[in-house]
Amino acid sequence: MDPTTVILIGPMSAGKSTLAALLAEKLGRPRYEIDEDRWAYYAEIGYDRAEAARIVQAEGMVGLLRYWKPFEAHAVERALADHPGCVIDFGAGHSVYEDAALFAKVERALAPYPNVILLLPSPDLDESVAILNERFRRLLETEVGHVDEALLAVNEHFVRHPSNHRLAKITVYTEGKTPEDTCAEIVGMLG
């Protein structure tokens, strides 16, 4: 059991990065984002950029997200081993798996960690989807210049998928709270 590591999971635009930064500062621990090293971890088990590009051309981002799944499960295992005692921000896809074997692999990797925290705006999944996709829509408009409706559908899938709920040991609802309020709530739960 590793009681010092704090792992934040959840869909896109749930606030994982913001809260990871606040928690790391408040707890005096390093902050780590799996997305920082994902490509190096993916390469360890044969990630093929040419194949990824072919998939994007043929199937779009949804196909690419599907291709990433075995690599994401590997990255979870490696990140947990390489970054003990950190506040870890999982990328949104790193906690959602359709394939039972990949889900079991991630579930085993997270088993020793009591502080796996799912962030959602609300216990009402419809409300969470609406809030998160509005945030995600604004982010896409600002950073990419357009909104890919397929990505919004993927994010809704991430909200509704049982993986996050099964992996989480704690769920924190954020709507109506500032990031600082949510950080204080999580610190209080950690004891």
Image (spheres, helix red, strand yellow):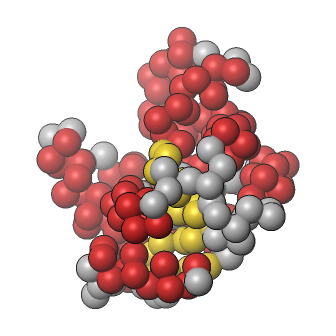
In this rendered view, identify the residue nearer to me: 20 or 149: 20
**Residue at 54% in and 12% down:** 50
Q: Is residue 73 above or below residue 55?
A: below
Q: Is residue 145 above or below residue 139?
A: above
**Which quadrant, please, contains the N terminus?**
bottom right
Q: Residue 147, image x and y in percent?
A: 24, 48
**Which quadrant, please, contains the C terminus?**
bottom right
Camera sees residue 137: yes
Q: Residue placed farthest to the top in the image?
A: 50
**Residue at 30% in and 76% down:** 180
Camera sees residue 11: no
Q: Is residue 149 above or below residue 81?
A: below
Q: Residue 144, image x and y in percent?
A: 21, 39
| Residue 7, quarter of the rendered image | bottom right
Taking the image as shown, residue 22 lies to the left or right of residue 172, namely: left
Q: Residue placed farthest to the front in the image?
A: 28
In this rendered view, identify the residue nearer to me: 161 or 81: 81
| Residue 88, quarter of the rendered image | bottom right
In this rendered view, identify the residue nearer to me: 34 or 132: 34
In this rendered view, identify the residue nearer to me: 147 or 38: 38
**Residue at 25% in and 67% down:** 134
**Residue at 73% in and 23% down:** 45
Q: Is residue 176 above or below residue 109?
A: below
Taking the image as shown, residue 64 lies to the left or right of residue 18, namely: right
